[in-house]
Image (cartoon, grey):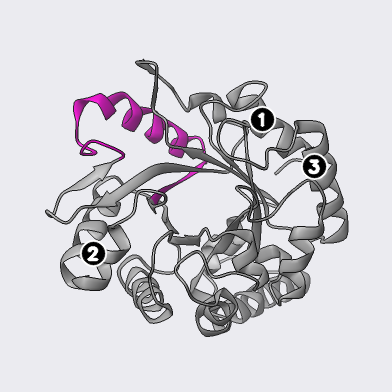
């Protein structure tokens, strides 16, 4: 065994101490060590546009995270990715491309729920049955994490039960994201489930990787830093909150054109050194082109 210098031994002690702090705080050590400076997250829901396949591969080298959306737990016991089972042959190329993204270092997550309601109601009514469906999909397709996009009634107790079970089954390195509207994070609305996200953060923050706020559709704006500032004033650390924008005015109200959005993101990075990053809904029709929207966002934040 090689001997180590005093400086090396001190450095190892400091690293170990830092890891102990993370564990004590309930944070995943490996995930924290590998975390990018700022996340650039792409939502990948439209896999086909006008009958043509939309490949996510141009996101390599740009995005830090890609979410495959949207999964639904149906009352009949089936699981759909949008309108079809995830094993449908139409998705074969997509799964190959998703594997290539993962190999390039991008974290790939599943998005559950969204505007297509029913998944969380089914989890509330029969947790054992419908959680099992979710768990199996996450394992089958080797997802790095899951985004719980709750846009229907789902209590704080239900949400905490789901997060705890995900952590128990997938461990500390698995990413657990929630995507409430920005005003929910600011404490001025209760759209995304009907509960207090500030209370959720107090109860279970150590088991949640981050929140991606929806700053669009009337629930906030990234035309300035004001909506994000309100979230910080409500007690959320900037490192815990990504700023979600729409990539095209066709996707929802609240579109912020690229130069103004870049200005807001630069201000957030300067104002909050630990700023979590940004996300865009959605990939396929981003302006001026899909991958370039995310490249502009990444560059505005000084790179990932």
Q: Earlier in the sequence, mark 1 or mark 2?
A: 2
Secondary structure at numbered mark 3: loop
Residue 212 as seen in the image, left or right of residue 194:
right
Quadrant assignment for the C terminus: top right
- The image position of residue 249, as x and y in percent, is 63, 32
- The image position of residue 93, as x and y in percent, is 31, 24
Residue depth check, mark 3 versus mark 1: number of the one nearer the observer: 1
Secondary structure at numbered mark 1: helix
Residue interval drawn in magenta: 82-111
Residue depth check, mark 3 versus mark 2: number of the one nearer the observer: 2
Q: Is residue 150 above or below residue 292?
A: below
According to the picture, the residue beneath numbered tag 3 turns out to be: 302
According to the picture, the residue beneath numbered tag 1 turns out to be: 293
Q: Earlier in the sequence, mark 3 or mark 1?
A: 1
Q: Nearer the viewer, residue 268 or 124?
A: 124
Q: Residues within 10 Å of mark 1 (few under 14, many from 20)?
A: many
Residue 257 as seen in the image, left or right of residue 158:
right
Q: Nearer the viewer, residue 141 or 155?
A: 155
Q: Which mark is residue 236?
A: none
| Residue drawn at the location 28% of the way across and 65% of the way down | 121
Q: Is residue 206 above or below residue 177?
A: below
Q: Is residue 219 above or below residue 233?
A: above
């Amino acid at each position: 065994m090689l001997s180590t210098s005093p400086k090396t031994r001190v450095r190892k002690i400091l690293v170990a101490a830092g890891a102990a702090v993370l564990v004590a705080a309930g944070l995943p050590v490996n995930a924290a060590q590998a975390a990018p400076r700022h996340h650039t997250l792409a939502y990948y829901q439209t896999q086909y546009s006008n009958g043509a396949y939309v490949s996510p591969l141009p996101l390599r080298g740009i995005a830090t995270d890609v979410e495959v959306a949207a999964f639904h737990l149906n009352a009949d016991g089936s699981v759909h990715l949008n309108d079809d089972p995830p094993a449908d042959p139409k998705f074969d190329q997509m799964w190959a491309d998703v594997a290539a993204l993962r190999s390039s270092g991008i974290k790939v997550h599943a998005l559950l729920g969204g505007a297509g309601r029913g998944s969380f109601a089914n989890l509330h009514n029969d947790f054992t049955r419908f959680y099992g469906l979710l768990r199996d999909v996450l394992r089958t397709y080797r997802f790095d994490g899951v985004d719980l996009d709750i846009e229907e009634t789902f209590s704080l107790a239900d949400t905490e039960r789901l997060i705890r079970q995900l952590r128990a089954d997938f461990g500390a390195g698995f990413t657990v994201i929630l995507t409430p509207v920005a005003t929910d994070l600011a404490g001025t609305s209760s759209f995304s489930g009907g509960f207090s996200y500030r209370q959720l953060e107090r109860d279970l923050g150590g088991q949640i990787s981050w929140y991606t706020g929806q700053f669009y559709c009337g629930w906030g704006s990234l035309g300035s830093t004001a909506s994000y500032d309100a979230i910080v004033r409500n007690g959320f650390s900037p490192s815990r909150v990504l700023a979600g924008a729409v990539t095209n005015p066709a996707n929802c109200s609240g579109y912020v054109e690229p130069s103004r959005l870049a200005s807001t993101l630069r201000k957030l990075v300067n104002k909050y050194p630990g700023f979590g990053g940004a996300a865009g809904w959605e990939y396929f029709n981003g302006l001026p082109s899909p991958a370039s929207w995310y490249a502009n966002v990444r560059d505005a934040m000084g790179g990932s």
